[in-house]
Image (cartoon, rainbow, N blue to C red):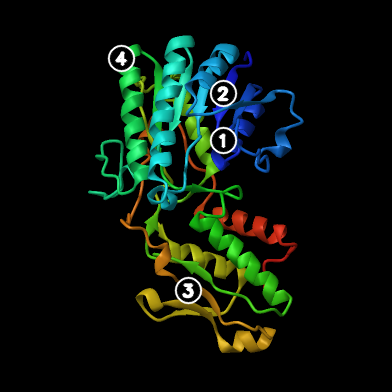
Amino acid sequence: MEPKNIFITGITGQDGSYMAEYCLNLGHIVYGMVRRTAQIHDENYRHLLNNPNLKIVRGDLLDGGSLDSLVQKIKPDYFINFAAQSFVGDSWQIPEETFMVGAVGVLKCLEAIRKYHPTCRFYNAGSSEQFGNVLYCPQDEKHPFRPRSPYGAAKCAAHHLVKVYRESYGLYAVQGLLLNHESEKRGPEFVTRKITQGFARIVQAIKKNQHFEPIKLGNIDAKRDWSHAKDFVDAVWRMLNQDVYNTLLKDLTGQALVSELKEYVVASGECHTVREFVNVIIEHLHHDCRWVGKGKDEVLILNPEFIKRFNIHSAELVSIDPLFYRPAEVDILLGDSSAIRRELGWFPKISFDNLIKCMLESDLNESGIISISAD
């Protein structure tokens, strides 16, 4: 297959860096955009810099001129937009920036493609936060948008813009509805990485016979559908190549092709609470502990025998801090990804337990800890 030009925004983040790696492994040429005004943080894609097919370019999602220039120069076969203010919690503190990048930035991407390279295939990162205050579980492609955050509202606006440009100008433009996806590259502000980094800190303190502070969390009974980001970039690529994967499936199964361009929910189909996420880590670490208290006074504490055995100087592992509650909570998100599994042949490969194990072991190794047991 002839190498394609892939333009990826947000390459410094979790999804963008995994997408770059995925496309490079397919033999394509990747142009990764970083902001002109930002200090470059290349931790997530540094291991790819020796690949001659990776080109780093400067631009800004809110600078239409820079996007126009890059699209004209690169002439991308695929434009994959992962750039965003992606932390839902911060979207109440910086709602204008969140909406500008998440919605107006997408408009500028679409305009650059429309004006200068309309054969380019465009993908924009959507979110389960678009479902918001859900009406039913699991959520599928027909579920209405009921966002409960500025972040979710921005993604809804972008979704409508992508549809308008697809129908008005005949662009190959889609926005996937991706449920929660995490990895070792996830930012520390996200609750999953906050938890795994927090436990790595605690294990390190235990091994050094030092005092430690508990991990402070918000709503530990919020339910989410978690997957590994590596699985999701494969789903994105399939959405960008629906004609190819539909043909492959027809050849294998004899099923009729899907006749129109579609947008899909991508999810594991499993629902877990934040509490369960913590409990899986406890099982991996073999710590002897229990939850005590109720509501905002609930804490996860080590049992006295365990504290005595290892001469531990603190008891609390997790405590609740109302500061981390959202102004409007989304209680449950659970995706129905049966359509993309049936029509594009996508399936997740990394389980919930293995996702957590990968994240925990990465953070333990970062702390200089090889073994995940307390002793």
Crowdedness near tag 4: few (<14), some (14–19) or many (≥20) residues, C-alpha within 10 Å? few
Q: Are marks 4 and 3 in contact (CB under 8 Å)?
A: no
Give the answer, above or below, for where 35 lies relative to 355. above
Residue with the mark numbered 1 = 16
Give the answer, above or below, for where 272 lies relative to 186. below
Q: Nearer the viewer, residue 344 or 357?
A: 357
Cα–Cα span, label 2 and label 4: 23 Å
> SS for tag 3?
strand
> SS for tag 1?
helix
Q: Nearer the viewer, residue 3 or 253?
A: 3
Q: Earlier in the sequence, mark 2 or mark 4?
A: 2
Q: Earlier in the sequence, mark 1 or mark 2?
A: 2
Residue with the mark numbered 3 = 319
Q: Locate residue 107: give its quadrant.
A: top left
> SS for tag 4?
helix
Q: Please provide percent x and percent y for residue 295.
A: 35, 75
Quick check: 238 left or right of 50?
A: left
The quarter in which the C terminus is drawn is: bottom right
Cα–Cα span, label 3 and label 2: 43 Å
Q: Earlier in the sequence, mark 3 or mark 1?
A: 1
Cα–Cα span, label 1 and label 2: 10 Å
Residue with the mark numbered 2 = 7
Could one spot residue 248 in this view of the protein? no
- The structure residue drawn at horizontal position 59% and vertical position 15%, both measured from the top left corner, is 74
Q: Amino acid at mark 2?
A: Phe
Residue with the mark numbered 4 = 168
Crowdedness near tag 2: few (<14), some (14–19) or many (≥20) residues, C-alpha within 10 Å? many
Residue 112 is labelled as none
Q: Amino acid at mark 4?
A: Ser
Q: Earlier in the sequence, mark 4 or mark 3?
A: 4
